[in-house]
Amino acid sequence: MSDILLANEANVRLGFFCTVFGVMAIWELLSPRRRQEIPRIFRWSNNLALVVMDTIIVRVTFPILAVGAAVLVEDRAFGLFHLVNIPSVVAFILSMLLLDLIIYFQHRIFHHIPWFWRLHRMHHADLEFDVTTGIRFHPLEIVLSMAIKLSAIAILGLPALAVLLFEIVLNATSLFNHSNLRLPAPVDRALRLFLVTPDMHRVHHSIRVRETNSNFGFNFPWWDKIFGTYQDQPVDGHEKMTIGLTQFREAECLRIDKMLLQPFKSKQSQPDR
């Protein structure tokens, strides 16, 4: 079974992406958390065009992607996990946790190093918060993130099946926790014990700098609580909070050409402390 999944990695990931995206898009239409003012057709067409561009660029830039790199590492018994005798189940669980922890710290670094922030701020410059925000990343950030991920896979020697599952889960949770969903408060509290929810991550997209520099997690909520970056709720409440940044607030900034040029604009280089 695992061999079949790995051999069809691209199709498996695409199938999960389309399924989760469709479910989230319908769900947030039926039960929206916030009223949206910007026409969906305008934002979605540009955000979706961006993810197509990201996919093409990363495929061209890297002849081998995360799962392929993990297969190669596994075949050659390379990396830390192959130097110590770790049971396969333990290695699998550790891989999921370590990859998520790496992305948590990568996310924090992208907020605090000026030029990394210039790349990442395009994600925060979306003026609404919905499922397409979860796929709105600058191509240069995607390339840099892939390089970090490949390095982690090679150094640690992570199992290929764990990497594939992590890629699927990360993609799905990014769509979920960026969705404009209204979850009942008891459900949200229960989910936050083991999963980043839309209400938790929406705080991270607040215009308030202190809130922007909180809730960095994508999959697991534990890292924010362990490392002191967790904020339970936005000061202004979810319905009244302002999404985005203090700059790039014109509607034309949501066009794909404007998004691609944002890192090279001479405006605010990093969030104010």
Image (cartoon, rainbow, N blue to C red):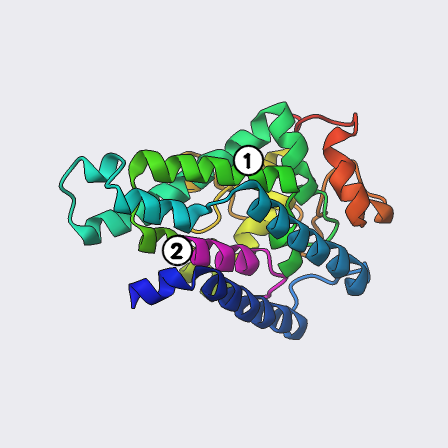
Magenta residues span 164-182
Residue 80, how many percent across, how many down? 24, 35
Residue 124, how many percent across, how many down? 67, 43
Mark 2 lies on residue: 164
Q: Is residue 173 left or right of residue 227?
A: right
Which residue lies at the image location 65% right of the left edge and 34% below the top edge? 119
| Residue 144, label in figure | 1
Query: Can residue 220 be seen by looking at this rendering?
Result: no
- Image height of 168 relative to 72, above or below: below
Give the distance between the C-alpha atoms of the residues marked 2 and 1, in whole angstroms.
19 Å
Residue 136, how many percent across, how many down? 65, 50
Q: Is residue 21 left or right of residue 146?
A: right
Helix or strand or loop: what does disc 1 sit on? helix
Which residue lies at the image location 41% right of the left edge and 61% below the top edge? 190
Say which quarter of the image contains residue 153: top left
Image quarter in which the C terminus is found? top right
**Quick one: which residue is furthest to the left in this view?**
85
Q: Is residue 251 left or right of residue 50?
A: right
The kind of residue on which mark 2 rests is: Leu
Image quarter in which the N terminus is found? bottom left
Q: Is residue 146 left or right of residue 182?
A: left
> Which badge, 2 or 1, is on the more N-terminal residue?
1
Query: Can residue 49 be seen by looking at this rendering?
Result: yes
Which residue lies at the image location 85% right of the left edge and 44% below the top edge? 250
Q: Are marks 2 and 1 in contact (CB under 8 Å)?
A: no
The kind of residue on which mark 1 rests is: Leu
Tag 2: Cα neighbours inside 10 Å, few (<14), some, or many (≥20)? Answer: many
